[in-house]
Amino acid sequence: MPPKFFPTHGHLLVCQGPNCQARGSALLHKALWNHLERQSLAYYKRGGTLRLTESGCLGACSYGPALCVYRPDPGGAGLEEAWYAAVDFPLAARVAQATHDRAPLPAEHRYGPDPDA
């Protein structure tokens, strides 16, 4: 029997590189995971749609913790991505909720690819 497939609206990655860990990324990951579970946003909860993963370096070493989100592009053309530096829990929770709701992602602390380019 194959494993169960859980459809998702997005995937959040929290950097666990040494510089981000020194700035609290392990605690951020744990707090965000607890939030996704409590709010039934985690992919395996009824109505939940989000995956959360620890990642390697996301490139914001001097500005961690860093968070990246990938989700289906609202226009239906591939994936939308957003990268965030200096992420605190309130920002991470807003990114998660916007990803789940398929709403516009927050602009504060974004870096990397320009969404309007």
Image (cartoon, rainbow, N blue to C red):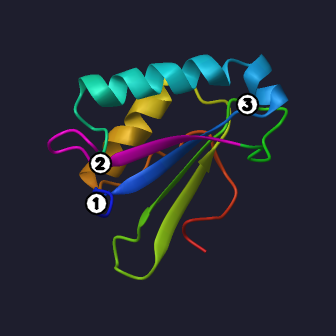
Residue corresponding to mark 1 = 7
Is disc 3 in contact with disc 2, using a CB cutoff of under 8 Å? no
Q: What separation in Å lies between label 1 and label 3 (alpha carbons)?
A: 29 Å
Q: Which mark is residue 66?
A: none
User: Upstream in the sequence, badge 1 or badge 3?
Assistant: 1
Q: Is residue 47 above or below residue 7?
A: above
Magenta-drawn segment: 44-55
In magenta segment, residue 9: no
Q: Which residue type carries mark 2?
A: His
Quarter holding the C terminus?
Answer: bottom right
Q: In screen coordinates, is 6 left or right of 91?
A: left
Q: Which residue is tagged 3? A: 64
Label 3 Cα neighbours within 10 Å, binned few <14 / some 14-19 / many ≥20: many
Between 110 and 69, the one lying in front of the other is: 69
Q: Considering the numbered disc 1 on the image, is that residue within a helix, a strand or a loop?
A: loop
Mark 3 lies on a secondary structure that is loop
Within 10 Å of disc 1 (Cα), the crowding (few <14, some 14-19, many 20+) is: few
Q: Residue at x 45, y 26 (%)?
A: 32
